[in-house]
């Protein structure tokens, strides 16, 4: 059977199993099996495939037709131009999250020179201590460390298995990054950061049952379930993050496309953060909320003003 016909058969079987992107997945699986890239696949489209390769390819197609994620079959996922190892123990990095990394990198790279110390100017930039909360595969923190040599990242996660994957990714991508196990901010006890980034669980509990089979049946539930309204983890983060941020420290969180106003209000009501900025992803959906710790004097002045107004009333 010719390569072109074999891959077309794979596409047909995946489409029949209601797999999204059947054509792309069929090609990806053939490239994964043979070590080809897409250009080679095109150039060798009319070549005959040996029986052993054909059999192994159809075995991979059968796995994918069972709605096992493509990334769990290949063991990797591309993110921010890097190849990350993935497994059923971690959330598969998605393009949506690249918006979070890109915005965090922009903040780091655009630090005004007048805010740098003399030593930082000599080193060529500010040293950033970053906490990657609920780090999973480590994709966010590792990507930031790859972008800037001035970033020191602590990856924190409650899952020991997830941390093992993250540590392997850091080694593979030659990033020096520390990891610690614990629930939410526990691994960061006693530390202060210039930036906290996180992609916490934010799917509403009732919505999980209607997610794609690849997600609900194969990705870790604890990385998906954000509680009844999807905001459980944000409440914890907003309440506690201020205690782990340095003066003028940044908080950047990935959010669901319909959670921007909820987070904006949550941060405003807390009173310790600057007005939240909502950043949209490439399709134009709300994807990241960004704010800073407010100046304590400003906070006290506003609180005093509010008290005086109440007294006048």
Image (tube, helix red, strand yellow):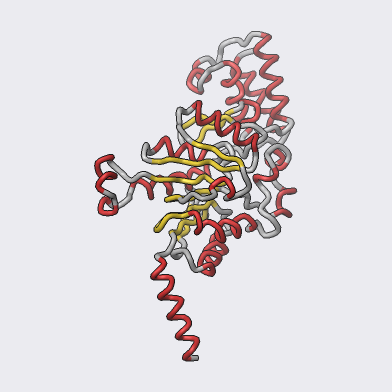
194 or 95, nearer to the observer: 194
For residue 56, side relative to residue 276 (left or right): right
On screen, residue 147 above or below 269: above
Residue under the image location 40 percent in, 75 percent down: 301
174 or 300, nearer to the observer: 300
Residue under the image location 68 percent in, 28 percent down: 12
Image quadrant where one finds the N terminus: top right
Q: How many discs appear?
A: 0
Hey, which residue is sitting farthest front in the picture? 190
For residue 313, side relative to residue 118 (left or right): right
57 or 117, nearer to the observer: 117
Q: Where is residue 136 in the image (x, y as percent from the top left)?
A: 59, 40
On screen, residue 179 above or below 310: above
On screen, residue 99 above or below 9: below
Residue under the image location 67 percent in, 60 percent down: 229
Q: Where is residue 152 in the image (x, y as percent from the top left)?
A: 43, 40
Residue under the image location 64 percent in, 18 percent down: 6
Q: Position of residue 307 (x, y in %)?
A: 48, 82
Q: Where is residue 219 in the image (x, y as percent from the top left)?
A: 68, 39
């Amino acid at each position: 059977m010719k390569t072109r016909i074999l891959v077309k058969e794979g596409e047909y079987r995946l489409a029949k199993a209601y797999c999204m992107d059947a054509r792309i997945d069929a090609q990806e699986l053939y490239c994964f099996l043979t070590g080809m890239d897409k250009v080679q696949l095109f150039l060798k489209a009319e070549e005959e495939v040996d029986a052993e390769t054909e059999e192994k390819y159809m075995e991979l197609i059968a796995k994918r037709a069972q709605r096992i994620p493509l990334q769990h079959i290949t063991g990797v996922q591309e993110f921010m131009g890097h190849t990350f190892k993935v497994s059923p123990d971690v959330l598969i990095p998605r393009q949506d999250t690249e918006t979070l990394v890109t915005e965090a990198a922009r903040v780091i790279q655009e630090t005004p020179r007048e805010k740098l110390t003399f030593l930082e100017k000599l080193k060529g930039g500010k040293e950033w201590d970053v906490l990657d909360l609920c780090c999973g595969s480590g994709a966010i923190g590792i990507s930031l460390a790859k972008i800037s040599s001035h970033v020191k990242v602590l990856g924190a996660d409650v899952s020991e298995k997830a941390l093992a994957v993250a540590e392997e990714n850091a080694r593979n991508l030659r990033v020096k990054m520390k990891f610690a196990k614990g629930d939410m901010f526990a691994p960061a006890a006693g530390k202060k950061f210039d930036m906290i980034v996180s992609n916490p669980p934010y799917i509403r509990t009732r919505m999980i049952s209607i997610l794609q089979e690849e997600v609900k049946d194969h990705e870790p539930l604890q990385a998906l379930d954000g509680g009844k309204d999807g905001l459980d983890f944000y409440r914890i983060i907003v309440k506690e993050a201020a205690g782990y941020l340095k003066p003028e420290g940044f908080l950047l969180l990935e959010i669901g496309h319909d959670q921007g106003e909820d987070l904006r209000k949550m941060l405003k009501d807390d009173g310790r953060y600057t007005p939240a900025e909502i950043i949209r992803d490439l399709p134009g959906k709300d994807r990241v909320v960004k704010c800073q710790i407010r100046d304590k004097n400003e906070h006290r002045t506003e609180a005093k003003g509010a008290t005086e107004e109440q007294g006048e009333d």
